[in-house]
Image: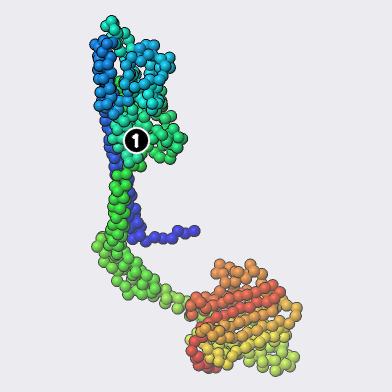
């Protein structure tokens, strides 16, 4: 299928709009990418700094606990067994001054309590010696240990974090012996440090041990109850640093740092949708600006395209005027050399076409006149010979009436043909010419066929170009009626269609035509359009004469079926009546 043509204005405006829009889209996309990366980097750096700050604060707190341990270590080393009451008093004062300290106790290596701020210890020495904090300190795996969270083994059973280490204390003989120092801490300090960090709106910080167990979590109760889950698996796969992962349908940033002097790891969780929240107004503004720029680009490209193609549009309108037949047009003047050159060439072309059309029109008029003259002057020798032979035969047999009738019909036939200078005659005269022809043929073929001519009185003086019916009747006789075994019938009827047209219907009951033959009758390239008998005037000639005289909506239409007959319809306009043509005898 042929692709529909597009105007230059449309092509220019669309091309410019697409180019500018692509530039705006690419620029906006790059800005969005750069801004997203910058904001993402800044938020990640900010979150990392917050986690680092919490880590530093937690390290400071742990150092503070170590300082407390060192204080107790020094106090135990320099105080004799007789001064345990004084040590007890100082430890109780220390407990009461700090909210994060639950209890302070000193046990010998057998698990027996030496000093404790707990008023009553019901746990047996054997049970104490089996506690993890006790064994780790007693086995000497390191200088000190943080264990937790676990239930307080010597107090009320609350969850605590235990600090344990080996210290020396003086007995009654001032002899130094080894002991285990236990400091139980609650989660107040750790909770305050964690809650003070704001990674995002719902972000949080939790602490895990080196074994992957949770030391502190702000939602530990929900985790214990199974309401909430934590992505400890991915954390265990990353020892240190930060990464982005998706957990439970939300993308989040995980930051992992190691707490100094412990084997704990502090984990910061920040949700990406909250971190990138500042991007939303930026993106909305960017998209709005991009849409505005694209709309401006469309309007600007259309305006520029209209300005550039305006002379071409004017030239196109001038061409359409020429197409309609108006040659009195003046080519528009363009602002560019190309348009100016086109306008000049168009003006020269219009003048040349006008001259050629005048010349062609004159040539066609001469050609039509010569064809008509040749048609009027042409007498088929075979037809004339047969007609005169029939006249002689009638005269020899004494059929004087038949001789008179045939000679009269022949004279009437030629009266219309020699009416030179009159291309248009009345419909009555055209059908009278056909009647004379049919009378001659009827007598020649000895009444092999009969004919009917129906002409309403109101159409008798309607004008028509002459010699358009007789060739059709001739074809009906030679190609339809001639081969019939029974009597043939040729019927000619003129009708007023009521819409400004007249139809002359010529029908016969001859042998008819096959569809492939019928389809070629009005084909200029087919020899079937030319009659091989009679005056040699083909149907295509008649159709072209009618169309040339009245327009393309007029002419011939043919219907035919084998063994049924053929119907030829001639359509001409219903014009104002004219006077009949009187042909003088020479």
Task: Where is residue 260? Give x, y as percent.
Answer: 30, 22
Task: Where is residue 489? Give x, y as percent.
Answer: 69, 83
Task: Where is residue 328? Give x, y as percent.
Answer: 32, 75
Task: Where is residue 332? Give x, y as percent.
Answer: 28, 68
Q: What is the secondary structure assignment of the residue under circle 1?
A: strand
Quadrant the C terminus occupies: bottom right
Relative vertical location of residue 282 with respect to residue 62 in this rendering, above or below: below
Residue at image x 27%, y 11%? Answer: 82
**Quarter occupied by residue 121:** top left
Residue at image x 73%, y 82%? Answer: 487
The residue tagged 1 is: 204
**Quarter occupied by residue 221:** top left
Relative vertical location of residue 469 with respect to residue 182 in this rendering, above or below: below
Label 1 neighbour load within 10 Å: few <14, some 14-19, many 20+: many
Residue at image x 25%, y 20%? Answer: 90
Residue at image x 75%, y 80%? Answer: 486
Q: Between residues 29 and 199, which one lies in front from this camera angle? A: 199
Relative vertical location of residue 16 with respect to residue 394 in this rendering, above or below: above
**Quarter occupied by residue 80:** top left
Q: Between residues 97 and 39, which one lies in front from this camera angle? A: 97
Relative vertical location of residue 315 with respect to residue 446 in this rendering, above or below: above
């Amino acid at each position: 299928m042929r692709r529909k043509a597009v105007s230059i204005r449309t092509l220019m405006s669309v091309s410019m709009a697409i180019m500018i829009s692509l530039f705006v889209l690419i620029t906006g996309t790059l800005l969005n990418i750069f801004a997203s990366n910058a904001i993402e980097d800044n938020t990640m750096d900010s979150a990392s700094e917050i986690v680092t700050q919490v880590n530093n604060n937690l390290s400071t707190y742990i150092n503070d606990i170590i300082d407390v341990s060192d204080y107790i270590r020094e106090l135990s080393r320099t105080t004799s067994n007789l001064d345990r009451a004084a040590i007890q008093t100082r430890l109780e004062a220390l407990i009461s001054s700090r909210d994060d300290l639950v209890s302070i106790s000193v046990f010998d290596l057998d698990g027996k309590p030496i000093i404790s701020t707990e008023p009553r210890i019901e746990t047996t020495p054997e049970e104490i010696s089996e506690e993890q904090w006790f064994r780790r300190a007693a086995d000497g795996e390191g200088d000190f240990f943080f264990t937790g969270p676990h239930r307080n083994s010597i107090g009320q059973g609350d969850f605590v974090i235990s600090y344990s280490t080996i210290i020396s204390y003086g007995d009654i003989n001032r002899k130094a012996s080894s002991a285990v120092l236990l400091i139980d801490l609650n989660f107040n300090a750790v909770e305050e440090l964690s809650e003070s960090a704001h990674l995002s709106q719902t972000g949080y910080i939790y602490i895990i041990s080196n074994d992957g167990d949770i030391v502190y979590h702000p939602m530990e109760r929900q985790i214990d109850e199974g309401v909430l889950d934590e992505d400890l698996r991915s954390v265990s796969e990353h020892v240190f640093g930060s990464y982005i992962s998706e957990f439970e349908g939300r993308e989040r940033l995980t930051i992992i740092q190691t707490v100094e002097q412990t084997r704990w790891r502090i984990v910061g969780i920040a949700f990406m949708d909250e971190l990138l929240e500042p991007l939303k107004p930026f993106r909305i503004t960017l998209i709005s600006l991009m849409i505005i720029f694209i709309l401006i680009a469309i309007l600007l490209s259309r305006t520029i395209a209209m300005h550039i193609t305006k002379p071409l549009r004017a030239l196109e309108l001038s061409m359409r005027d020429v197409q309609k037949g108006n040659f009195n047009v003046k080519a528009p003047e363009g602002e560019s050399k190309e348009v100016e050159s086109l306008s000049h060439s168009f003006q020269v072309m219009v003048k040349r076409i006008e001259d050629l059309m005048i010349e062609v029109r004159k040539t066609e008029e001469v050609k039509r006149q010569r064809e008509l003259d040749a048609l009027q002057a042409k007498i088929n020798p075979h037809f004339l010979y047969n007609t005169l032979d029939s006249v002689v035969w009638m005269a020899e047999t004494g059929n004087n009436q038949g001789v008179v009738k045939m000679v009269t019909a022949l004279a009437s036939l030629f009266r219309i043909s020699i009416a030179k200078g009159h291309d248009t005659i009345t419909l009555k005269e055209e059908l009278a010419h056909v009647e004379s022809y049919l009378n001659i043929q009827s007598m020649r073929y000895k009444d092999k066929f009969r004919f009917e001519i129906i002409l309403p009185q109101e159409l008798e003086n309607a004008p028509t170009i002459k010699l358009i019916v007789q060739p059709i009747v001739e074809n009906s006789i030679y190609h339809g009626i001639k081969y019939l075994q029974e009597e043939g019938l040729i019927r000619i009827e003129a009708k007023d269609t009521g819409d400004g047209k007249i139809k002359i219907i010529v029908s016969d009951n001859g042998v008819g035509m096959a569809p492939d033959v019928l389809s070629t009758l009005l084909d200029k390239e087919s020899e079937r359009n030319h009659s091989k008998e009679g005056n040699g005037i083909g149907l295509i000639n008649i159709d072209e004469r009618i169309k040339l005289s009245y327009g393309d909506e007029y002419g011939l239409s043919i219907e035919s079926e084998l063994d049924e007959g053929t119907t030829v319809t001639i359509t001409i306009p219903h014009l104002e009546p004219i006077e009949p043509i009187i042909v003088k005898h020479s």
